Amino acid sequence: MSNNKLKKEAEAFQRVHPKEYLKKYLVKGIRPDGRDFLETRGLRITPASISTANGSSVVRIGKTIVVCGIKAEIAEPTYDDPDSGFLVPNVEMGPLCSSKIRPGPPSERPMVYSEVLTKILHKCQVFNKKSLCIEPAQAVWCLYIDVLCVSDDGNVIDAAILAMSNALKNTYLPSAQFDEEAGLIKADREFMAPLDITCDLFPLTFSIIEGGAILADPDTNEEELADGTLTLVMNGSEGTLAYMLKTGKASLSLDQLQSCLKVAQGHASVLKEAVSS
């Protein structure tokens, strides 16, 4: 039987019985793309890629591509927090990024991802929102963090977190002052200052497959067949766990959780070196 015919039969079997197809690989200790269970795909981070944005980044994980652009606008602060600015993340995943996404209203996934980014920013305190204050009770900066998935081949959430973290790191704001007499904000774009970022965020997501297999950096097929996911976000400055998210019905033992944490710490060290170089 020719290799071409074998390949077509394998592809047909994968389409009809995707879970059985994956299991046939996993019982042999390998994944369909040749990776070990805890092996991640190649990653590339390109900072400051959008000239019209205050900050931006492009992240590629395997064939997954995510772009993050940050735009700063002046806004009125809230009554309860008059000297703090705003961070507004939004994730978009259109039909062009994947054939599995249909045209029409946004699906649940990007809305969930937007909520996760919001929780991470609140929980991890990447920087002090009070540094976004221009004049207390008068004006603050609002940072719109727009994350666009260009290509979805799995693990969009890690790419989105990395893109957001890196975009914030190279975000610059113009010098701004409140003119009390005119009642206006005057911004000078000749003097741009970076955000005072306190830490980088380095995530790693695992898919938990029925039977106990745990796969790091899942591709889109592995995501669809997973019974649960675990996302660990490391604080790059301290090397500690900054955020953890567990979804799905699959359970993890303490030993499995500690093993995932160890892998995430090692992955964060590699990412930290890549970002610094």
Image: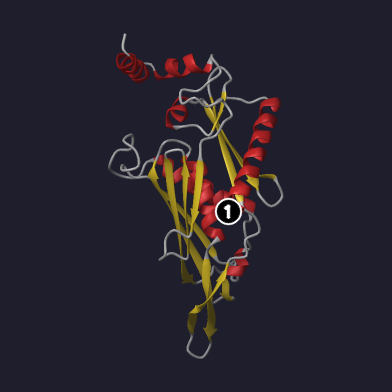
Residue found 31% across the figure and 42% down from its top: 95
Residue 243 in view in this figure: no
Residue 131 in view in this figure: yes
Residue found 34% across the figure and 18% down from its top: 7
For badge 1, the amino acid type reads: Leu
- Whether 246 is drawn above or below 4: the answer is below
Disc 1 target residue: 121
Question: Under tag 1, what secondary structure?
Answer: helix
Residue 134 location (% of width, % of height): 56, 75
Residue 269 location (% of width, % of height): 65, 44
Binning the other alpha carbons within 10 Å of mark 1 as few (below 14), some (14 to 19) or many (20 upward) gives some
- Whether 47 is drawn above or below 257: the answer is below
Q: Is residue 122 left or right of residue 164?
A: right
Marks counted in the figure total: 1
- Whether 270 is drawn above or below 8: the answer is below
Residue 127 location (% of width, % of height): 62, 60
The image quadrant of residue 5 is: top left
